[in-house]
Amino acid sequence: MKLAAVAVIWVWIAGCSMPQGRLFWRVRELALAPSPAIELQNPEGKIVLTMNAHTVNKLLLAHFRITRSAGVQAELVIAEGEHPNAFVGLMTGRRVVAINTAMIILIGDDIDEFAALIGHEAAHWAKGHVDAGKLRSKTIESMGALLGSGLGMAGIPAAGLITGLGADMIDATFSRDDEREADAFGVEYMLANGFDPEAAVRLHERMLKQPGGLHVPFLSSHPSSAEKIDNLKKLIEVRRTQVNAE
């Protein structure tokens, strides 16, 4: 048995690229699925992605542990997307960390790489980068709608329709200093929770091999380069040296 899950929402998105009008699925609800495979479907019933339930649960646990270390409350969502990306935003007034379907396909079941993504995005919330980006940006008022279906059939809460949701669409980007700080604290969160920080290096090396260069949203908003990879390696080496010395 596979669970069909649908959620459509317009959200306020900041930094790290800005997809608009996409499908979003709440991971905490997907994790309640009583089946080994979860089908993410669009409103027309087309399957967008099928995920292993074990991977979904490990992904949610990594999110809980890292956001706790970061001292932030943010919901983890999966976003529709053709090109690998991850970003932060507001959904019905709540903070979210989002990973899109293309990124999930790219990473597969490497939870350490997912932890690297979540740690970086959580750091943007923890260090106030999102609020600063909002103040720098032009606000556009819009209306959105949230649709959830399929979950109720499996006994999972939050199915139903919500309309008239107000959403601020903010075109914000993070500075280089913000990105460096998010990298540093992302490594801290990974180490604090037993994840392999080398996964952050693997992730950016993997992204550098993606076709399309800067046209890939993740690469345009999280510039992956030899310099960034070297900086990550130095951060990891310094922190591991410090931990061993303690």
Image (cartoon, helix red, strand yellow):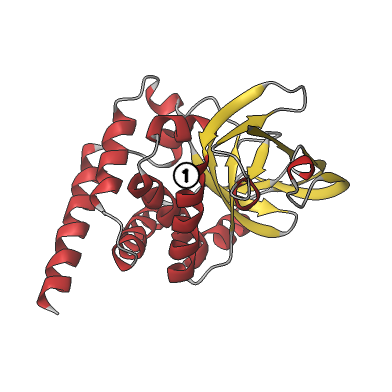
How many residues crowd around disc 1 within 10 Å: few (fewer than 14), some, or many (20 or more)? few
Q: Which kind of residue does numbered mark 1 sit on?
A: His
Residue 150 rendering spot, x and y as whole percentages: 76, 37
Q: Secondary structure at mark 1?
A: helix
Question: Residue at coordinates 39% horizontally, 57% vertically from top-left?
Answer: 182
Residue 235 found in image quarter: bottom left
Indicate the quadrant containing the C terminus: top left, top right, bottom left or bottom right: bottom left
Indicate the quadrant containing the N terminus: top left, top right, bottom left or bottom right: top right
Q: Looking at this rendering, what residue extends furthest in the bottom direction?
A: 246
Q: Nearer the viewer, residue 244 or 111?
A: 111
Residue highlighted by disc 1 = 54
Residue 2 rendering spot, x and y as whole percentages: 63, 32
Question: Residue at coordinates 51% horizontally, 53% vertically from top-left?
Answer: 60
Q: Is residue 102 visible?
A: yes
Q: Nearer the viewer, residue 130 or 24?
A: 24
Q: Is residue 16 visible?
A: no
Q: Is residue 128 left or right of residue 189?
A: right
Residue 119 found in image quarter: bottom left
Q: Is residue 163 left or right of residue 76?
A: right
Q: Looking at this rendering, what residue extends furthest in the front direction?
A: 1
Residue 209 rendering spot, x and y as whole percentages: 29, 25
Q: Is residue 227 above or below residue 180?
A: above
Question: Residue at coordinates 35% horizontally, 24% vertically from top-left?
Answer: 210
